[in-house]
Image (cartoon, rainbow, N blue to C red):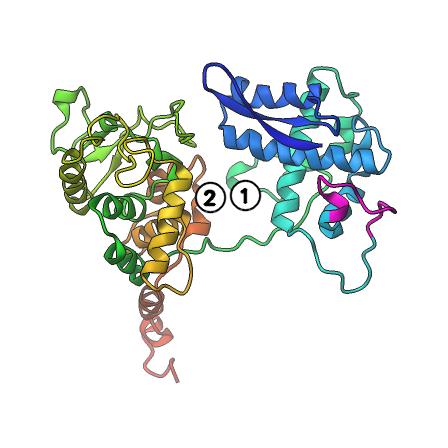
Amino acid sequence: MRAFPVRLPSGVGYWTVLDDELAVMPEADAFLRHVRFGRDQAELTTHAYAGHIALYLRWCVRTGRDWRTAAADLALFVTWLRYGSKKTTGIESPSPSGLVLAGPGAEHARGAARIENVLTGVRQFLCHGITVKTVPGEVLAQLYEVAEDWDLPIEARSAGMGYRMKTRHRVKVPRKPRDRASDAEIVALFGACRSARDRFIVLLLARVGLRRGAAAGLRREDLHFMPDSTALGCAVAGSHLHVVRRENVNGAWAKRQVGAGPGKPVDFLVVQAYDQYVIERMALPHGPASDFVLVNLFAEPLGAPMTPDGVTDLLGRLSRRAGLSRVVSPHMLRAAFASNVADAGGTLDEIAALLDHAWVSSSTPYLHPAPDRLREAIDRVPSPRETTGQPGAAR
């Protein structure tokens, strides 16, 4: 079992699952087509789900289980994922025994976050099978249990006693803050740029907080870098840009559709960097051709839109050229943007809106309070003597 890309005549693509005979697994293909076209999710989402399903089906084949009812033993699947070597769980033929032997001190082959993601994909696949009657209905009880809502945030609880469907198989994933790029690293990246386009990309990620897919999918019509855009039919005041979900030839995909919203504000530095990039771009014979904002100016294919991977590769080159001790990723610049907004006094709901998060709680891992802000928070706490008005209370 393996994940495999499919490209339709229209140019739209998704990922499916092939069996060991390189034949399409029909139930998996139906689910993945539903995810791509029925739910309007990204091609990369089907890529991830296809990998999860392939692992699950591979486990079923190599342990002699029927994939339709193997959810009863999903705990063993978790163990297989956690300790199974590439020889046991990979595409190549398994070891002669086909067993996972995990003794004391055995190292994990996969981390908790990776396993939890795989379980999510498998549950989605099996639930779709239950809906279309290819999986027995009783499997739902093997995946979920009825639970009280006491462990949910207070905002999510219903009035009185509430119940919900809770996953039976879970892996504890510690929620760590997103690793952010430091301001010094951002300045170093900016200084390492050799073109106006590269400087604009750094600022687009670090001062607007765009995901790499959203940045690579921008079109010229999405940039409203004027004090007044009413002539363009846009009532949003000030310089801003719109993130619009489209089918793009470069594989770029906006995770959320926010084009009809208020727009993402940009500051003078971003506008100035874009002006310099336009001058640079229009001076080249292949510069004006594409409607995409970010295009290849100095590498083949010239004039073609940059891909999301191209943005990541650029930051890798800039990190090495700047002599940084680590490679700064696009998401690290996005986390830096969120942290800097918080340090400047931005509230959590403002940060969630700027990051295009559907839930305010999704923004909390991106917050990295600066040490100076933490010190100021402590200094704002009055002493007991000040609050009680007793001269000797602080002794």
Q: Residue at x 78, y 27 (%)?
A: 139
Q: Nearer the viewer, residue 308 or 363?
A: 308
Indicate whether residue 94 is drawn in magenta. yes
> Can residue 78 be seen in this snapshot?
no
Helix, strand or loop status at disc 1: loop
How many residues crowd mark 1 within 10 Å: few (<14), some (14–19), many (20+)?
Answer: few
> Can residue 310 be seen in this snapshot?
yes
Q: Looking at the image, do the residues carrying marks 2 and 1 touch, with CB atoms under 8 Å apart?
A: yes
For marks 2 and 1, give the CA distance.
10 Å
Q: Position of residue 222 (x, y in %)?
A: 25, 28
Say which quarter of the image contains residue 181: bottom left
Q: How many marks?
A: 2
The answer to whether residue 235 is above or below residue 380 is above
Q: Main secondary structure of the magenta part?
A: loop
Q: Position of residue 177 (x, y in %)?
A: 47, 55
Say which quarter of the image contains residue 23: top right
The answer to whether residue 87 is left or right of residue 367 is right
Q: Mark 2 = which residue?
A: 361
Say which quarter of the image contains residue 384: bottom left
Q: Residue at x 24, y 58 (%)?
A: 191
Question: Mark 1 is on which residue type?
Answer: Pro
Q: Mark 1 = which residue?
A: 153
The answer to whether residue 101 is above or below residue 98 is below
The part of the chain drawn in magenta is: 87-100
Q: Nearer the viewer, residue 253 or 281?
A: 281
Indicate whether residue 289 is drawn in magenta. no
The answer to whether residue 386 is left or right of residue 144 is left
Of label 2 and label 1, which has the lower sequence position? Answer: 1
The answer to whether residue 304 is left or right of residue 40 is left
